């Protein structure tokens, strides 16, 4: 009897956590992709500043409200601008940033192939 | 001829990259929010600071008046510095001051107001800081000038004499 009581109480306590494992995973993923605005070089996930603690809470609430990851990002982008996202969006200002590595890679590949055939 | 052409292209690419990165060095790597915004006031439902009654944003910003929404906390040192300017602003009838008590405890916040004076018409308490995030705030103190349900100006950091003159110029 006592065992059943303990088991019941334990299961009730464990069920108090409203987030399931998937939601915690998404929450952490989002927090890792956000720049902490007051602590340089840290993500919101890593930071323990007042701002980051509140932001993590906001993310948790938004997930519970049923918002998708993209919706949360766009909400934060609207509030704080693109600076808060670690992953820069592909637009006019960032063409160079996204395309330069590919161009360099292709040019390097072309040089290597050319050298290889010349040697042959 | 061909190798000359390749080296010219390489120099060209290198100089363009250099110029872009050099210009990038001068960009600020600290978050600088846009201070002139015309955004709608985010709606909130918060507990009043004095008693636990619920206050909704629509009820606060309902008149055709100017409102200064000031985020403050008793533990925040710069808030003490800006307080005298808020007290000055209190005397102006064209503007109402709304206090957003950020992550504070009632006892400390009340003694803060008792010692330095209470400039606010209404104070709401943002216990977990989530309502401030809805406003796009990221620290204390921060103030938002609101008119006709729109944020017209944002002041990051403590209000100083210059900001006070700017506010007076806007509400004139």
Image (cartoon, helix red, strand yellow):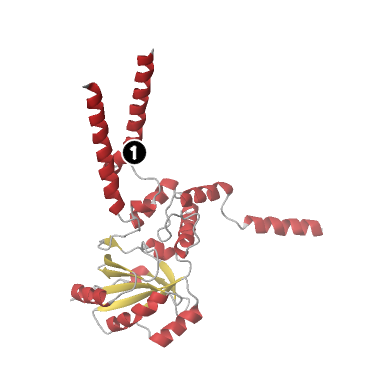
Whether residue B69 is visible: yes
Q: Furthest-top residue in view?
A: A120
Instruction: Give the left or right position of residue B102, taking residue A104 as reference.
Output: right
When the figure is inspected, residue B31 is found, relative to residue A102, above or below; the finding is: below
- Camera-side residue: B152 or B59? B152
Residue drawn at x 32%, y 80% is B86
Q: Quadrant of residue B77?
A: bottom left
Instruction: Give the left or right position of residue B87, taking residue B132 as reference.
Output: left
Residue drawn at x 28%, y 48% is B22
Q: Using a 10 Å C-alpha cutoff, classify the residue at mark 1 as few (fewer than 14 neighbours), some (14 to 19) or many (20 or more).
A: some
Q: Where in the figure is residue B20, as x and y percent of width and height?
A: 27, 44
Q: Where in the figure is residue A13, as x and y percent of width and height?
A: 66, 59
When the figure is inspected, residue B131 is found, relative to residue B87, above or below; the finding is: above
- Camera-side residue: B88 or B15? B15
| Chain for disc number 1 | A
- Camera-side residue: B36 or B42? B36
- Camera-side residue: B141 or A76? B141
Residue drawn at x 39%, y 85% is B116
Q: How many marks?
A: 1
Instruction: Give the left or right position of residue B83, taking residue A8 as reference.
Output: left
When the figure is inspected, residue B74 is found, relative to residue A37, above or below; the finding is: below
Judging from the image, what secondary structure is the residue with disc 1 in?
Answer: helix
Q: Where in the figure is residue A76, as x and y percent of width and height?
A: 38, 54
Quarter in which the N terminus of chain B is drawn: top left
Q: Furthest-right residue in view?
A: A1
Instruction: Give the left or right position of residue A7, taking residue B35 as reference.
Output: right
Residue drawn at x 48%, y 74% is B104
Quarter in which the C terminus of chain B is drawn: bottom left
Q: Which residue is under mark 1?
A: A98
Q: Where in the figure is residue B18, as x and y percent of width and height?
A: 28, 43
């Amino acid at each position: 009897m006592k065992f059943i009581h303990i088991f019941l109480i334990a299961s009730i306590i464990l069920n108090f956590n409203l987030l399931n494992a998937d939601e915690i995973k998404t929450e952490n993923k989002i927090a890792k992709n956000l720049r902490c605005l007051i602590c340089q070089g840290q993500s919101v996930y890593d930071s323990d500043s007042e701002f980051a603690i509140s932001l993590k809470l906001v993310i948790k609430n938004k997930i519970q409200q049923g918002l998708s990851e993209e919706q949360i990002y766009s909400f934060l982008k609207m509030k704080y601008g693109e600076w808060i996202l670690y992953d820069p969006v592909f637009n006019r200002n960032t063409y160079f940033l996204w395309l330069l590595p590919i161009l360099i890679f292709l040019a390097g590949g072309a040089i290597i192939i050319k050298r290889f055939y010349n040697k042959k | 001829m061909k190798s000359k052409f390749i080296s010219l292209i390489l120099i060209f690419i290198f100089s363009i990259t250099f110029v872009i990165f050099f210009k990038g060095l001068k960009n600020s790597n600290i978050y600088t929010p846009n201070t002139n915004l015309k955004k709608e006031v985010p709606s909130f439902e918060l507990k009043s600071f004095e008693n636990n009654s619920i206050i909704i944003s629509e009820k606060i910003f309902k008149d055709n008046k100017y409102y200064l929404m000031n985020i403050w906390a008793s533990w925040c040192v710069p808030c003490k510095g800006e307080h005298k300017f808020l007290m000055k602003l209190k005397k102006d009838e064209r503007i109402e001051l709304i206090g957003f008590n950020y992550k504070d405890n009632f006892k400390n916040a009340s003694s803060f107001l008792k010692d330095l004076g209470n400039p606010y018409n209404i104070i709401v308490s943002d216990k977990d800081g989530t309502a401030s995030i809805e406003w796009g705030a990221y620290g204390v103190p921060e103030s938002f000038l609101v008119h006709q349900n729109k944020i017209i100006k944002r002041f990051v950091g403590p209000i100083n004499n210059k900001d006070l003159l700017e506010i007076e110029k806007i509400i004139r």
